Image (tube, rainbow, N blue to C red):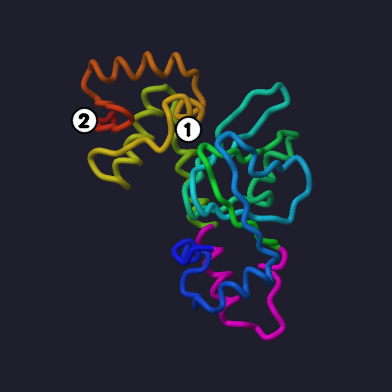
Amino acid sequence: MRTEEMSLGIFEGIEEKEKGCMIQCFSGREQSFSAGSVLADYSEESDQIGILLAGRADVVRIGGAGEKTLLEHLQKGELFGRPLYLTAESIGDAVTVTAAEDCRVLFLNYRRVLSRCENNCPHHVRLEQNLMGIIMRKVQRLSERVEVLSRRSIREKLLCYFSMQQTQAGESFLLPFSLSRLADYISVDRSAMMRELKKMKEEKFVTVDHGRVTLMKTLY
């Protein structure tokens, strides 16, 4: 495993010589996936968490009627695992993690990660702290998603999402996924969203050029 990959958030502050030992202790395994492949299917019990070493992936909820909802778009260094998506299971929905492009994933046994070693190893303590930080950032992103979905109209959803992206990335930003995925993310019909986006361009609310968005004005 490459050194730069080992420096991902969960191993931040942990000495290089300790990382290999910790991965072995946590039953770590690295696996590669091609675009479109399923990284994880949480219809069954699993004690694995995954860390995206390279590529991008989508967490998708599949309802009883087969309808799909994009729950989360994962970037390099981000975490996914069954314990994070139990709410979907509780209402009978399935959750899968699918590669949006070629990916490599480090899988760890989260029960071993959360079980403090006998020596109360300071590196293990640091890893737990890093893991908690990653989970808190995930909670923040999911809170932002709720904020977007709480808006009543398609335009308000789009402007809310664009405003959040602009705050993080500056005046102009690249969408992290396609327009089809954006429609899934804000839970609206793609055709209806494209019509609204066309109106917003004509009214000079936004410009969109090959996935790069510039927000000219907002409703807020």
Give the dominant element type of the magenta stretch: helix, strand or loop.
helix
Q: How far is the residue under mark 1 from the one under mark 2?
A: 22 Å
The quadrant in which the C terminus is found is top left
Marked residue nearer the N-terminal end (1 or 2): 1
- In front of the other: 69 or 148: 69
Q: Where is residue 47 in the image (x, y as percent from the top left)?
A: 73, 56
Label 2 crowd (10 A; few <14 / some 14-19 / many >=20): some
Determine the residue positioned at 43% across, 29% down: 178
Q: Which mark is residue 150?
A: 1
Q: Residue furthest right?
A: 45
Number of on-image labels? 2
Query: Which range is magenta?
Result: 111-134
Marks 1, 2: nearer the viewer: 2
Magenta run includes residue 128: yes
Q: Is residue 58 left or right of residue 169?
A: right
Q: Is residue 32 left or right of residue 116?
A: left
Determine the residue positioned at 21% across, 30% down: 216
The quadrant in which the N terminus is found is bottom right
Give the amino acid at mark 1. Ser
Q: Is mark 1 on a helix, strand or loop?
A: loop
Location of residue 142 with respect to 175 vertically, above or below: below
Q: Position of residue 133 (x, y in %)?
A: 50, 62
Determine the residue positioned at 22% across, 17% down: 203
Location of residue 112 with respect to 207 vertically, above or below: below
Q: Residue 216 carries which label?
A: 2
Give the amino acid at mark 2. Met
